Amino acid sequence: MMKAKTSAPLKGLFFRELYLGRRTYIAVTGIFFGIVTLILLVLLSMKVGNLAKLPADVIESAKGTIRMAAMFVPSAIFFMNTSVVVDTAPADLSEKWLRFMYSSPVSEGKILGVKFSVMFITAAVGYGLSALLALAVGALMGEPATITDFGIIAAIMLIVVLFSILITVLSYAFKSTTGAIVIVLILAYFGMGIIIGLAGVGNPALSDEELFQNISDTINGFCKSVFPLSPLILAGMIALGWGLCTAILKHRDAKRPQLFRKKEKPAKDTAKEE
Amino acid sequence: MNTYENAIEINGLTKKYDGFTLDNISFNVPKGSIMGFIGQNGAGKTTTIKALLNIIKPDSGSISMLGLDNKEHEYEIKEQIAAVFDEQPFHEDFSAKELSIMMSGIYSAWDKAKFTDFLDRFGLPYKKKIKQFSKGMKMKLQIAAALSHGAKLLVMDEATTGLDPVVRNEILDIFLEYLQDETNSILMSSHITSDLEKVADSVTFIDHGKLLLTGYKDDILDSHAVIKCSKSDYKDIDRADFISARLTDFGAEVMVSDRSAAKTKYSGLAIDKTTLEEIMLFYVNAVKKEWT
């Protein structure tokens, strides 16, 4: 009667993950392609259309803005991960879903493997699309994209994925997405403080130009150094997040501190009398 | 081929919490039968079911399901069982159609045609979101899902609580049909003893984490009886002979666990048949011995 297999196929969980996050995926993909289309149309117009009639200095200054927009705005695609995590975590952590999950033939590692695989895939696809856009924008402007450009995109991706992973791990640890977001925001605040400190903000010896240059050098230096390692860092962060969440979920009956939520009663019959 | 006599075997299951202990619980669910698992709120039914499903780690004791150790063969067992809870666990934004897609990717033996048949039979819509379902519809959906992947054992935790009698009856009929295949078994935790009286083959009764009774339902109902007598007759009944006694304005009702012995010893008194609900009530009050 018994089958030799010890695990179930996972496509059901992939389906659930993508289905629960579908609104975010559709909305963000729509916004991404909307912005990309807009940027490319503006650039084309500046090259061969009506905008080409603008004075040269206006075009030159607009190019910088467009380049920045092409770099940063599509990074919204990376925030898709964070948004999906925030959307799906309450359902993933609900007592009734956890009970079902624990009674199904799928291990915690596989369930979370699906979640983190989706995170990895969306980050990688987002990076690929953003890099393609940077290449296209560079080609249209006659200034090819540089390693720094790709480094900036990689750094944005890593930071956003880090936020998503932190929110996921903390949500699982404290059974509260709100608590996780608050902790991550506090961490981000201190992180920004450290970066600003390193760039020399607040140092009276630096002029505004020197300060701007310092900030720019710090960011560019960081992005350049991160770029070649970004696939490894991404994979490492995802693996670490998966490992931590799996370890948390494996303690099925552990009492976890619950931030911003009422404490649950210990395992007792909770059904109401009819 | 794994052969087994009992779908569930629990031996010496113990789990300690602050203020509550599931204390040395042992019982078997014979293959091909329905066991009613009864007890008041906080008795330890859900804790026992959580231990069965490996959701909590017992302090001691062993559990085997479908002839296999529930820890060593966890995922093998879980392919072959279905758990039905008091609340449906699926995301409310799903429809039955999407649920079927998800389940087909979780259970290798998922039978979409069977699931669709159940939906038709229960009158459940295929494309409507679960959040638009009534409580009864949600429970039927959960049961349809539980019965559509060839489960050999159903574990039900208060699954019929809160449902109206018509829906409950429909569900009980499905269970009886499910048991037509004699290799299928059900453990059904419920407060509604009338349902269990209707369908259960055996009964396990726990209270405050302790096992009070386990055995075939008919044996339990046959051996127990209620002596209905006046207060003066009640005084003549040996306290060691009864579980507990309910004192009323008109006399006393005394629960005994050996009906034939009681019939011989107290032949002058009215000795009536009893129900699972009465047995539960009298056992719960056994510590007090006398209650009103």
Image (tube, coloured by chain):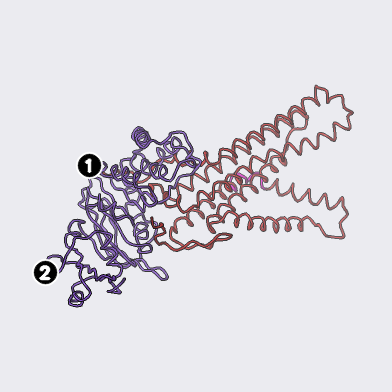
Please provide percent x and percent y for residue B115. Answer: 36, 36
Image: magenta residue range: A226-233
Mark sitting earlier along the chain (1/2) = 1
The chain drawn in red is: A
Task: Kindly indicate the quadrant of the structure image that contains residue A156.
Answer: top right
| Residue A256 disc label | none
Residues packed near mark 1 inside 10 Å, few (<14), some (14 to 19) or many (20 plus)? few
Residue B71, visible in the rendered structure: no
Three-letter code, disc 1: Gln
Q: Is A95 on the left-hand or right-hand side of A238? A: left
Q: Is residue B30 above or below residue B230?
A: above
| Residue B180 disc label | 1
Query: What residue did someone put label 2 on?
Result: B267
Q: Nearer the viewer, residue B187 or B68?
A: B187
User: Which of the chains bears the disc numbered 2?
Assistant: B
Colour seen for chain B = purple
